[in-house]
Amino acid sequence: MNLPNKLTLGRILLVPFFVAVLLIPFPLHNLIALALFGVASITDMFDGKIARKRHLITDFGKFADPLADKILVLAAMLCFIQNGLCDCVAVIIVLIREFTVISIRLIAAAKGEVIAANKWGKVKTVTQMTAVIAILVMQSVCDIIILCTGAQVSPALNQTFFIIGEILIWISTVFAVISGVIYVKQNIKFISEI
């Protein structure tokens, strides 16, 4: 297995640790979750660059890299729902988009074709990762306030952070829908052949 594929696999293997840290409340758990998500996001940036630079692009990488992104981001969003930080409607829309894209990829793979992510899919991933990182940063600020002052975070600050997080999640959801529609249009031949 080449280095880019190891980075992709490493990103997938980080997800259970990220989820555990995010869901088990202990001092500064959001900050640790942010660090884990940051490491995973960096591997996403480097695996593609290394693969292109060293000519190590593989069918596994074309399929697993976007899948690793989906697993990481959706794990974060589902944990946010569990922690009351995200609206489930946005996540349901993203799930529908992701299952649609994965289904098309599987149909294409059955016909011997591998469909790589397009630029809109990459924009979607960047907006999703940005939203997740921003929410984790805001929750880390709350953790630090609680740890340093011993007092609860003000309801106004909590509400402000929630609204900012929702706006960012919905922006990323809009990009998910746009990229999903474009993806379906670009690969309609696989759907029409069923």
Image: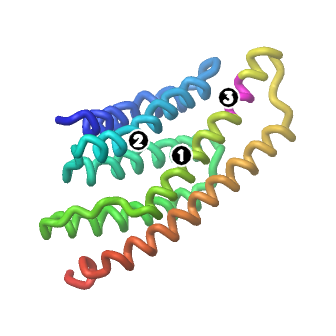
Farthest bottom residue in view: 192
Q: Earlier in the sequence, mark 1 or mark 3?
A: 1
Report the mark closest to the observer, 1 or 3: 1
- Could you tell me how many numbered marks the image carries? 3
**Residue 88 location in percent, x, y?**
58, 56
**Residue 176 location in percent, x, y?**
51, 63
Give the secondary structure at mark 2: helix
Q: Are marks 1 and 3 in contact (CB under 8 Å)?
A: no
Say above or below: 71 vs 115.
Answer: above
**Residue 38 location in percent, x, y?**
51, 33
Query: What is the CA distance from the residue labelled 1 to the residue labelled 3?
Result: 16 Å
Q: Are marks 2 and 1 in contact (CB under 8 Å)?
A: yes
Question: In the rendered structure, which amino acid carries the disc numbered 1?
Answer: Met
Question: Residue 120 magenta-drawn?
Answer: no
Q: Earlier in the sequence, mark 2 or mark 1?
A: 2
Q: Earlier in the sequence, mark 2 or mark 3?
A: 2
Report the mark closest to the observer, 2 or 3: 2
Question: In the rendered structure, which amino acid carries the disc numbered 3?
Answer: Ser
**Residue 146 location in percent, x, y?**
76, 21
Say above or below: 26 vs 41.
Answer: above
Question: Residue 142 magenta-drawn?
Answer: yes
Give the residue at x 80% y 45%.
160
- 67 sits left or right of 107 in the view: right
Query: What is the CA distance from the residue labelled 2 to the residue labelled 3?
Result: 23 Å
Quadrant in which the N terminus is drawn: top left
Report the mark closest to the observer, 2 or 1: 2
Q: Please give the residue where the numbered disc 2 appears in the rendered image.
A: 44
Residue stretch rendered in magenta on the structure? 139-143
Q: Please give the residue where the numbered disc 3 appears in the rendered image.
A: 140
Query: What is the CA distance from the residue labelled 2 to the residue labelled 1?
Result: 10 Å
Quadrant in which the C terminus is drawn: bottom left
Q: Please give the residue where the numbered disc 1 appears in the rendered image.
A: 129
